[in-house]
C-alpha cells in the first residue's frame, strides 16, 4: 500500500496476467547484491553447476566460483562486498526488479518470480571501474551464449540487463568505452 508507483504504473493489472517467470533471468550490473536479503534470496539466480567457495571452475564456463553471479570489478565470485554495503544501490535495484511479493516483508517488485543475476562491476579499491564494467558486460554475453549453446543446461537465460552504473560528479567523456 505504501508503494504508490506500483499503482501509478498499474502493476496490479499486469499481475492479473503474470508475476514473472523463474525461467527468466535479469542481470543487474551494479555494486553487487545482498543475496541473503529476505526479499531477494528466493529470486537470486544460482549457478547450480558451481560449488561455492571451492576455488574451482566446476562448470567450465571460465569463471571460478560464480555460484551467485560474478564480481567483475575484482574478478572473483564474491558479488557482495564492502562496496555493496557502503553503497547498497545494487540491492535496491534488485528489489525493484525481483523482490518477492505479497509476503509482508519489505517491498513488492514488478516481477515476483524472476531470477536476478548479481554482477558487481566495482573493484573494492575503486580503481579502474571502467574495466569492471566491460568485464561485467562480457560475463553477461558469455552466460547467455553458453545458455544458447548448451540448450539451456548451462549459463543463464538472460533476457534483460540493468546497468545503472551512475557515478557522482562524472561525465561520459571520462568513460568513453562505456
Image (spheres, helix red, strand yellow):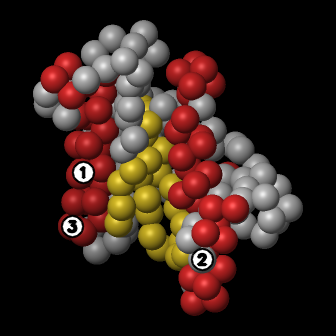
Pointer 1 or 3: first along the chain: 1
**Is any part of residue 108 visible from this angle?**
yes
Q: Position of residue 92 (x, y in %)?
A: 60, 43
Q: Residue furthest right?
A: 104
How many labels, in total?
Answer: 3
Q: Quadrant of the N terminus?
A: bottom right
Residue 10: numbered disc: 2
Disc 1, SS: helix
Q: Quadrant of the C terminus?
A: top left
Q: Which residue is mark 1?
A: 142
Q: Position of residue 9 (x, y in %)?
A: 56, 71
In this picture, is 129 found above or below 53?
above
Q: Which residue is mark 3?
A: 149
Pointer 2 or 3: first along the chain: 2
Q: Quadrant of residue 71?
A: top left
Which mark lies nearer to you, 2 or 3? 2
Q: As rendered, which of 138 and 16 lies closer to the eye?
A: 16
Q: Position of residue 69 (x, y in %)?
A: 46, 44
Amino acid at each position: 500500500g505504501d508503494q504508490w508507483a506500483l499503482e501509478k504504473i498499474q502493476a496490479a493489472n499486469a499481475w492479473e496476467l503474470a508475476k514473472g517467470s523463474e525461467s527468466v533471468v535479469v542481470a543487474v550490473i551494479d555494486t553487487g547484491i545482498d543475496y541473503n536479503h529476505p526479499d531477494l534470496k528466493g529470486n537470486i539466480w544460482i549457478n547450480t553447476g558451481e560449488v561455492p567457495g571451492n576455488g574451482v571452475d566446476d562448470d567450465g564456463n571460465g569463471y571460478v566460483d560464480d555460484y551467485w553471479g560474478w564480481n567483475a570489478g575484482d574478478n572473483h565470485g564474491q558479488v557482495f562486498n564492502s562496496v555493496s554495503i557502503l553503497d547498497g544501490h545494487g540491492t535496491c535495484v534488485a528489489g525493484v526488479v525481483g523482490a518477492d511479493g505479497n509476503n509482508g516483508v519489505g517491498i513488492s517488485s514488478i516481477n515476483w518470480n524472476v531470477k536476478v543475476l548479481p554482477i558487481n562491476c566495482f573493484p573494492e579499491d575503486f580503481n579502474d571501474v571502467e574495466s569492471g564494467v566491460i568485464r561485467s558486460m562480457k560475463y553477461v554475453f558469455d552466460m547467455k551464449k553458453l545458455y544458447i549453446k548448451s540448450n539451456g543446461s548451462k549459463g543463464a537465460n538472460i533476457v534483460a540487463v540493468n546497468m545503472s552504473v551512475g557515478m557522482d560528479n562524472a561525465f561520459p567523456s571520462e568513460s568513453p568505452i562505456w
